Image (cartoon, rainbow, N blue to C red):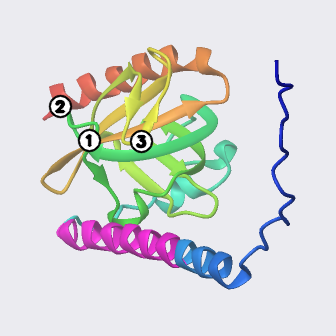
Amino acid sequence: MTPLVLIADPKQSAQVTDWADRAGWVVGLLLFVALVYWLMREGWKWRATLQSDLPELPTAPDALAAPPSRQAGGEPKLTMSGRYHGSTTAGQWLDRIVAHGLGTRSRAELTLTDAGLTVVRPGATDFFVPAAQLREARLDKGIAGKVLTEGGLLVVTWAHGDKLIDSGFRSDQAAEHDAWVEAINTISHDQEGAR
């Protein structure tokens, strides 16, 4: 019997990193990311242009801009701290409205009075929905890019110009949502009877 002799592979040096090739890939990836970001930004601006027929957002009357104790528009029925998640065309939860800053997510302070709904957004455009423009409120699970658990989102439907808009809010205390739905729907029904 002949002994089995294993011959080891000859030693090879480790492959040298090609820095020029690696730098080319990194630069290419950065350019691709910049292109995608630019296209997203242009798409956002294009959507705002398409929605340019939407009138300017109403602001709260001066009487409501005062502290609640001195407001002429009535005592606040409800106040809420939370987040504003965006607005869409009513009934179309993926058709985001970006005109006049309505597409900007932000913190929000909501105040509901007999005069309407005041939405104060630090770092974004504040707006006011007169009571006559409120249509309904409901609990939902999602709005344009934000999906929560069932009933985790307060959606307020309101008229602006000739368009119905759904705006989504989430309170820091989600248990408050039911009271908001009831109060807004009561105001909406009262206003509907007055029309």
Mark linked to residue 145: 3
Picture quarter containing residue 45?
A: bottom left
Q: Are marks 1 and 2 in contact (CB under 8 Å)?
A: yes
| Residue 17: percent from left, percent from top | 76, 73
Picture quarter containing residue 8?
A: top right
> For the residue labelled by badge 3, is the local secondary structure a helix, a strand or a loop?
loop
Disc 1 or 3, which lies upstream in sequence?
1
Mark linked to residue 132: 1
Work out how far the residue at label 3 is from the one at label 2, CA to CA, in angstroms: 36 Å
| Residue 170: percent from left, percent from top | 55, 31
The magenta span reads 31-53
Q: Residue at x 17, y 69 (%)?
A: 53
Amino acid, disc 3:
Gly
- Between circles 1 and 2, the one closer to the viewer is 1
Amino acid, disc 2:
Ala
Q: Residue at x 52, y 44 (%)?
A: 84
Is residue 56 visible to the viewer in this orientation of the structure? Answer: no
Mark linked to residue 194: 2
Disc 1 or 2, which lies upstream in sequence?
1
